[in-house]
Amino acid sequence: MKTIEQMNIDMIHQFIETFWNQSDFDCVDQFVTDDYQELAYQSKEGLKQFAATILTAFPDKHYTVEEIIGQGNIVLVRMTVKGTHRGMFFGTPPTGQTIDVTLYRRYRLEDGKIAEHRGWIDMVTMWKQIRGSEKNSRS
């Protein structure tokens, strides 16, 4: 029998694959509570809008979980996102540059769904890569 931590980790893996990698934005209700909280996105609709912005800017984007740990109802993730800048991204027109950036995520779950999310990304490295001023160190 799986522990609550393993069930939560599995659910977050599934969310990352379905929502972020497959761009199935309609799956949000399956994974996120009605009162979902996130500092940047504010709501489920905000999350979907942000994901659509990422998909437009980096249509070939792919997220890879590098490390994931769970403790009780908290899941911490270190992952990378790779993609090619092919669309407008926060006012910056496409450069054709590739990104390979580390992200950190903290999810709090309630009854098997994401109730709260906090995320951090190395924005300095990402913008350097978009502008072509830093070679990607990872392949």
Image (tube, grey):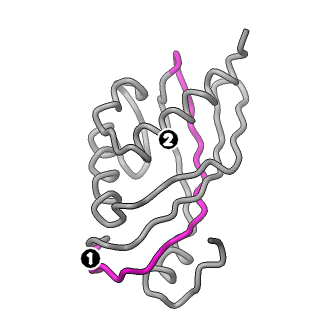
Total count of labels: 2
Residue 125, horizontal then vertical, whole percent: 56, 77
The magenta-colored residue range is 90-112
Between the C-alphas of marks 1 and 2, the distance is: 26 Å
Residue type at mark 2? Ile
Whether residue 56 sits left or right of residue 62 in the image: it is left
Label disc, if present, on residue 69 of the rendered structure: none
Front-lying residue, 112 or 10? 10
Front-lying residue, 114 or 23? 23
**Residue shown at the point (35%, 59%) measured from the top left:** 54
Tell me the mark number nearer the camera, choosing from 1 and 2: 2
- Image position of 118 with respect to 108: above or below: below
Residue 139, horizontal then vertical, whole percent: 62, 71
- Image position of 37 with respect to 65: above or below: above
**Residue at the outermost top position:** 1
Asked whether 107 falls inside the magenta stretch, the response is yes
Label disc, if present, on residue 16 of the rendered structure: 2
Residue 18, horizontal then vertical, whole percent: 43, 37
**Residue shown at the point (52%, 60%) measured from the top left:** 81
Residue type at mark 1? Gly
- Are there few (<14), some (14-19), or many (20+) residues within 10 Å of tag 1? few
Label disc, if present, on residue 91 of the rendered structure: 1
Local SS, label 1: loop
- Are there few (<14), some (14-19), or many (20+) residues within 10 Å of tag 2? some
Residue 39, horizontal then vertical, whole percent: 43, 48
- Image position of 18 with respect to 95: above or below: above
Quadrant containing the N terminus in the rendered view: top right
Q: Do the residues bearing badges 1 and 2 touch, measured as CB atoms within 8 Å?
A: no
N-term-proximal mark, 1 vs 2: 2
